[in-house]
Amino acid sequence: MDGLEAGNLIPLYKPYIPQLPELDAILHSGQLAAGKYTNEFENELQRYIGHKNILTTNTFNTAISVVISTLGIEHGDEVIVSPMACLASTQPYTAAGLKVVWADVDPNTGTIDPCFVERSITTKTKAIIHNHFCGYPGYIDEINAIGKKYGIHVIDDGIECFGTSYKGRMIGNCGTDVTVFSFNPVRVLTTVDGGAAIFNNGKLYKKSILVRDCGIDRSIFRDELGEIDPACDIKIQGYSATPNNVNAYIGLRQFEDLEWRLKRQRKNAKKWEDLLSGSSRYKPIRCINGEPNFWIFGIFSDNKRACIKKFRDLGYYASGVHINNNIYSIFGKRDTLPGVKEFYNSFVAIPCGWWVDMEAKIEEIKKEGIDL
């Protein structure tokens, strides 16, 4: 279920679909493939992030595939990855024939530990995949410095962090080589399904546009009759990864009240922080380098399952969200990572989204004298 709903519990995440007054006209226009709304959606993303080298894709998976091919990362190359991530963030690298090398995480943040990353670099390392766990920003400057030092690409995995900022800059505009975003149903910004890639290097960005579209240069692909021109050579491998007008239109409409939703989520987060400030059992994650989008609100507990049950009893669908991916045999060796173990054993996510009425719930908790 999209929102992890059970009974009458407040869901952990919830798809946001705005009013779509032009949808029927688009569906019957005969122009469903990439077009007007695809371009407008990309323009709006460029404005919002503050970066011009943005292209959108039909899925998050294809965004990663386009990035891998654009960067020239090949079968057998190594990539350093956090196991505290969604499988959608980790499987594409294995599917491309790359060797995933797990990095340990800082147990206080769930994001990769820069010192561990640097120790994991070999001559086969071609990229560091920096996941910002559940919307909480990691050590971006430190990881980027490591990438620069060793000449290795850094990819910010923003699957859950659209709208998150780091040291006053939007993630996607923090100087990282590449950033990828997911726009699947339960993300802060959704196109129902889709993704995006942002390239800090203009030449790579231009290459990625070709990679996204089967290697086709659309400016010379057809002749004056609209026929495919045999003089247009296809020189690089690519994908059929362009997003359609319907999904792009849905994404474009998301921007109308995106800021309201983010402000509401941050306001809810502050109320959770205040409510739990005196708790001896639950400790909120502290973010010192930026402002999360509060896709969820993260807390630590010394009894994870009891904590999940407690908040579900209060009416909130609490969850651990992700399990550490290094337990899966598909990735090979199951490394022992102490930071990952500590974080996974204590992390719980509780609802914090725009749909949560924190005022009413806080009053109920106070009135009933519920011990947190």
Image (spheres, rainbow, N blue to C red):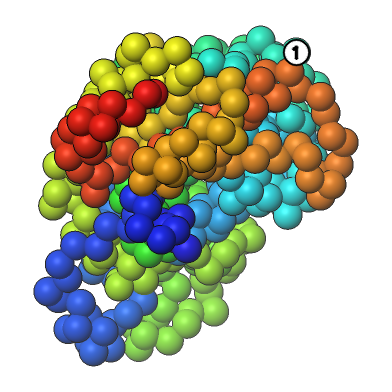
Residue positioned 23% across, 89% down in the render: 28
The answer to whether residue 70 of the structure is visible from this angle is no
Q: Is residue 286 above or below residue 235?
A: above
Q: Quadrant of the C terminus?
A: top left
Q: Which residue is more in the foreground, 98 or 216?
A: 98
Q: Amino acid at mark 1?
A: Arg
Q: Work out which residue is located at the far front of the displayed protein and give it.
A: 368
Tally the marks: 1
**Residue drawn at 44 percent across, 58 percent down:** 6
For image coordinates 45% across by 73% down, the residue present is 221
Question: Which of 158/262 is in front?
Answer: 262
The answer to whether residue 99 is above or below residue 274 is below
Q: Position of residue 106 (x, y in %)?
A: 59, 16
Q: Which residue is mark 1?
A: 119
Residue depicted at 44% across the width and 29% down the height: 298
Q: Is residue 93 visible?
A: yes
List x then y, in percent, for residue 113: 62, 16
Q: Secondary structure at mark 1?
A: helix
Question: How many other residues sit within 10 Å of disc 1, few (<14), some (14-19) or many (≥20)?
Answer: few
Q: Position of residue 59 (x, y in %)?
A: 49, 60
Q: Is residue 76 left or right of residue 28?
A: right
The answer to whether residue 148 is above or below residue 237 is: above
